[in-house]
Image: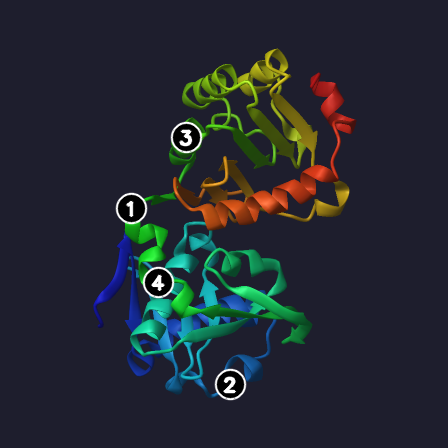
Amino acid sequence: MRAPLADKAGLRVRLADWEADEAGLRNVRTRVFVEEQRVSEAEEWDGLDPACLHAVGETDADGIVATGRLHPSGKIGRMAVLPAWRGRGVGGMILQGLLAAARSRGLESVYLHGQVPVLGFYARFGFVAEGEEFDEAGIPHRLMRLSLAAVPAAADAAATGTRRLVTGKAELALAVADVAALAGRSLAIFTPDLEHGVYDTAGFLEAVKRLVLSRSHARIRVLVSEPGRVQHSVNRFLYVGRRLSTFIEFRELPRQFQGRGDAFMIADRSAVVYRARADRWQGIADIREPRMAQHYLAEFDEMWQRSESAGRLRDLGI
């Protein structure tokens, strides 16, 4: 077994040996690509694996739960994380391991074919999309490239100690309160239903009050994707929002974005709490990740511009 590249929350990321780890690699990719995404066996097992460098994420209890590969040409691919481990930053750890390996092998750039729904994930690490969408294995993709010279290894936020994994509701609530406390101008919140016990804790509400009472131009925007599920009878954030309506605005997610399934909060343009799946508590929090924060803030701004305070939100009195 090779030395681990990273070790967090009981999960180790290391470079793999295809012959020794083939069974575990095949298990993850079969479950994710063949069974979940309906990619054909012939397309998945393309004969290139022995020539590639593989990274895996593994635990003592579950074995290999994530993987990705780097071809000698500089192409990164076959990024896969088992469902139970998604939303915990594991994919990012795999990608960082492959980027570090690419640098150590003298590659000046890398590229990948990114599935369109997850282009934002790769954009967080500096990948830039090029050209039009194309079909690969029945799934829309785009070509993405990254110049390794432009992104030094030290840029990894996890390595600088600013990032932490969120594995449960209590940790998420603490992360939300901590990141909100850093805001000096604004908060942008994209949430399914103002999660009770997350956006109405004492720590978060105190951070909100400090922000709006100390900054005359403070702005808090809240975009709710499922307002019908908001527990308005017990959610204290709604009460604070009504009292401080000059600074806090709630809107409903526009219909054209209803298929979106993630959730996040951005403080100013530099700190972020992000969950890939809003129906799970797992995610990451980073107090200094401007590239990621600005990417999701741009997406939030687009959704916000198309939204309005109407519909079911009127029933909540906001």
Task: Name the residue located 41 percent from the left edge and 27 percent from the top edge.
Answer: 181
Question: Quarter of the image containing the N terminus?
Answer: bottom left
Q: Measure the alpha-carbon separation of dots 1 and 4.
A: 16 Å
- Of residue 191 and residue 155, the one placed in the foreground of this image is 155
What amino acid is found at the position of numbered circle 3 in the picture?
Leu
Image coordinates of residue 236 in percent, x first then y, are 54, 17
Numbered disc 2: secondary structure: loop
The residue at which mark 2 appears reads as: 46
Distance between mark 3 and mark 1 Cα atoms:
16 Å
Task: Say which mark, if any, is on residue 152.
Answer: 4
Q: Amino acid at mark 2?
A: Asp
Between the C-alphas of marks 4 and 3, the distance is 26 Å
Q: The residue tagged with tag 4: helix, strand or loop?
A: loop
Q: CA distance from mark 1 to mark 2?
A: 38 Å
Q: Earlier in the sequence, mark 3 or mark 1?
A: 1
Q: Position of residue 274 (x, y in %)?
A: 48, 44
Q: Quadrant of residue 15?
A: bottom left
Q: Which mark is residue 182?
A: 3
User: In this figure, which colouring scheme has been used for the structure?
Assistant: rainbow
| Discs 1, 4 touching: Cβ within 8 Å | no
First in sequence, mark 2 or 3: give its number. 2
Instruction: Estimate the x, y position of residue 140 in percent, counting from the top left.
Output: 66, 68
Q: Which residue in the protein does label 1 denote?
A: 161
**Quick check: marks 3 and 1 in contact, CB under 8 Å?**
no
Q: Is residue 168 above or below residue 85?
A: above
- Front position among marks 2 and 3: 3
Viewer-nearest of labels 4 and 2?
4
Which callout, 4 or 3, points to the residue nearer the camera?
Answer: 4
For residue 60, say whether it is visible.
no
* Label 4 environment density (alpha carbons within 10 Å; few <14, some 14–19, many ≥20): few
